[in-house]
Structures are given as C-alpha cells and as structure tokens.
Amino acid sequence: MADEKDLGAASAPVAYDDSLGATYHRGPVILRGPMIPKKTTTTNLLEPEADTDWLHMDPWRVLRIQAEFVDGFGALAELGPAVTVFGSARTSRMDPMYRAARHVGRKLAEAGVAVITGGGPGIMEAANCGAARAGGKSVGLGIELPHEQEINKWVNLGMTFRYFFVRKTMFVKYSSGAIVFPGGFGTLDEAFELLTLVQTHKVARVPVVLFGTEYWHGLMDWIEDTVLEEGNISPLDPELVLVTDDEDEAVRVALSEIRG
C-alpha cells in the first residue's frame, strides 16, 4: 500500500518553490533563475553590431545564396517558355554578329518566347534589343563583377546576381533552348555547362545552337577528333547540338522543344 501511495504522489502536479524566481519564455523553452538571459531576443536583434565579421562567414553566405535562389525563382517562375542567348559583352554594334543576335532576339519574341541573356552589352544587348523592340519579354540576368556592367537598357525584366552558379541555374531552369554566339571564357563556361547537362541527361532535352561556324569549327573539331576519339565523351546528339550561320535555322532549332 505504501508503494501505491508513493506512485500516486509522483503523478500529482509539482509545486515549484518560489525561490526559483520568475519564469522566462524563449519560444518553446522555459528559463528560470540564473538561466534567464539579461537581454531578450528582440534586444539582440536590434542592438548595433560592433563586430561585422559575421557578414563574411559561411553561415551568412548560405543565407545570401538561398535568398538569391528565392528571388530568382520568384522573378522568373511565371515567365513562360524562354530561350537563352549567350555571347560576348565585347561585340561592337557594328559587328555582323550584333546584327544577327538582334535578329534572333526579334524572331524569338515574335514566336511568343521570352529571350534571356546575361543582361550586359554586346551580344546580350543585341538579343535584348531585338526582343524588346518586337514587344516581347526581354530578360537580363546580370552578375556582380569587379568592373561592374549595368543591365542594358533593352531589358524589361532584370536581376543582378552575386553568384555565378545561382545565375547559371536560372539560365538552365527557365530555358528550353540556347543560342550561343561567339564569346570568351564566360560564354564558353555557359556553353559547356549546358552541353554537360545535356550529355549527362541531367536536364530534359535542351537544343544548343553554336552560331558562327568559322568561330566554333576549331572547338568542335577538337571535341570530335580528340576528345571523342580518346573515348572521353559519347557522340554529341546532332538533334541537340547544331553549328550554323543561318539565323532562322538557329531560332528554329532553339524552339524545337517548345514547339514539340
């Protein structure tokens, strides 16, 4: 019987000694006595920081990266079908490639497809110009660089990114095709990123057009005669990778997966 009484006492409500002091709630956590913090969460949030090293630590970078993804997805989620146009920022307005890119941008817009570029000058400006003048969606996804390049004036939906890999994710996620004009390391990086994803089946079928046979033939010869011959890649799908000088053919192939 004594054991039963003990069990009953153990299940009764516990009366806390007043010596523990007031109860402090921090979210779901209860704190009493010496465990109560001297400053509230709100006080800590609003208090000026004497040390700003936390701005450059990896946990804060993760939040910035996450924010860029959220902003990018939010900006482009309702864009509709789109084709990305890559190319050099250094191409002058007098260059035939500039005219060709502008024509491509116009044709894509007339087909009801958004044009996405890196938002800078040169080829990017030309494609945005063609799309905007045709009344289409002209998207520019810029990048923060030491020598800042502002978003060109023909962009009607623009965003600037801190991180290349976030920006490239946006290019790939929202494009159903790509036209790659002559360019430098940035253009090559974007082209090979796409080719890698296509060849490894990490993305759905995305046709890639390399515009300008004279510019690209050396690279393609090396890929086919050296890289492929050494067995380091599988043959490129001719339906997904095209080298051409014909603007209308470039547009047709880039749109092939959209038109079905």
Image: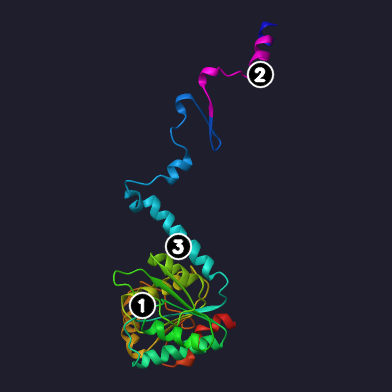
SS at mark 3? Answer: helix
Residue 246 belongs to the span the image colors magenta: no
Q: Which residue matches tag 2?
A: 11
Disc 3/disc 2 C-alpha distance (Å): 53 Å
Crowd band around label 1 with a 10 angstrom C-alpha radius: few (<14), some (14–19), many (20+): some
Q: Which residue matches tag 1?
A: 187
Quarter assignment of residue 65 = bottom left
User: Looking at the image, is mark 1 or mark 2 earlier in the sequence?
Assistant: 2
Q: Is residue 3 above or below residue 108?
A: above
Q: Which residue matches tag 3?
A: 68
Q: How is the image coloured?
A: rainbow
Crowd band around label 2 with a 10 angstrom C-alpha radius: few (<14), some (14–19), many (20+): few
Query: Magenta stretch?
Result: 5-23
Disc 1/disc 3 C-alpha distance (Å): 22 Å
Disc 1/disc 2 C-alpha distance (Å): 72 Å
User: Looking at the image, is mark 1 or mark 3 earlier in the sequence?
Assistant: 3
Q: Quadrant of the N terminus?
A: top right
